[in-house]
Amino acid sequence: MHFRKYCPLPSQQECSVMENFDYLERSGLLAVGKYDILENIFRFVDDRALRNIRDASQMINAIKSTSRDARANGYDFFAEIRIKMSRRCPAIEQQLTYIFNDFVIGLEDALSPRFQFPPFYFVHQSLKCPIDTGLKIIKGTERPDRFPLIWRTTNNTLKTLTNFISNYNKDASRSSRIIVQTLLMFLYNLKQKYNVKRWRFLWKEFMVLSVEFDNPFDLRAFLRCSYLLREDTKDTFYLIFDHVNDIRLSIPYIEIRNASIQSK
């Protein structure tokens, strides 16, 4: 009832509260830190909800202000996850690093405004995470034709991986799908749990996953969870390397460190 003014379509009239929230997000009226519409909806309806909305707005604005101040002073917020194999094969590790980096850059570019999309595309898909979408496509729960650039990037990575690991693995096609799905799940969890903004795979005599954050709060939360992160990373890349080579490798050693830099 209270959403009717802002959700005017007949199809919205019988929707649940969560479905109305989803509609407001997709239409661009509601976003992180953009809660004016919620204040209008709850102003004469629920004082407690109104206070919570205003408190959330103030907290988010404070975080944004701190982040802007830090960036104005030339700080970029990075952490590194270093993946070191005890029984090493640097040639394989290095090539995988380059394949993974091309993959994440391709997914990042897939929703870039510089690409031409149909008029309806951003209405329905602008809030989609390319990592999440790629994962759903791999699992078969999302149609590839709805996200052609994400599918093309994912499919090209599958082909590149299959071609590369066929030298070491008798079932390269199946293993490639497992590797890509495992990697996407890991990256998706990083984004959901720790608000990772961007990631890159780097080669520094071993594989490094560089992760970037918008603010120092997310970086600190990430570093505080380093024990759990090490375990998740260890399990993920043990599974990945296990499907690269028919020879079972040892469990990787994981280091997590603050890599923030002063860019000015």
Image (tube, rainbow, N blue to C red):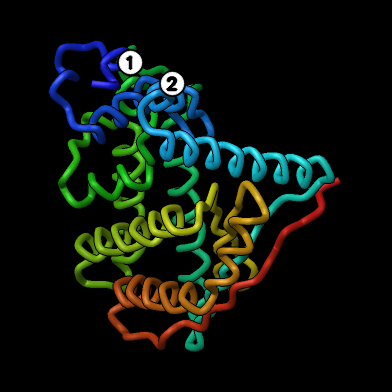
| Number of other residues with Cα within 10 Å of mark 1, as a class: few under 14, some 14 to 19, many 20 or more | some
- Residue 227 drawn above or below residue 49: below
| Closer to viewer: mark 1 or mark 2 | 2
Residue type indicated by callout 1: Tyr
Res 73 visible: yes
Residue at the image position 49 percent from the left and 70 percent from the top = 93
Residue at the image position 38 percent from the left and 62 percent from the top = 186
Q: 88 or 55, which is in the foreground?
A: 55
State the quadrant of the C terminus.
Answer: top right
- Residue 141 drawn above or below residue 211: above
Q: Quadrant of residue 178?
A: bottom left
Q: Which mark is residue 6?
A: 1
Residue 219 position, x and y percent, is 62, 59
- Residue 126 drawn above or below residue 97: above
In the displayed structure, does residue 254 sit left or right of residue 159? right
Q: Which mark is residue 27?
A: none
State the quadrant of the N terminus.
Answer: top left
Residue 200 position, x and y percent, is 55, 54
In the displayed structure, does residue 136 sit left or right of residue 225? left
Q: Quadrant of residue 237?
A: bottom left
Q: Which mark is residue 40?
A: 2
Residue at the image position 60 percent from the left and 52 percent from the top = 212
Q: CA distance from mark 1 to mark 2?
A: 10 Å
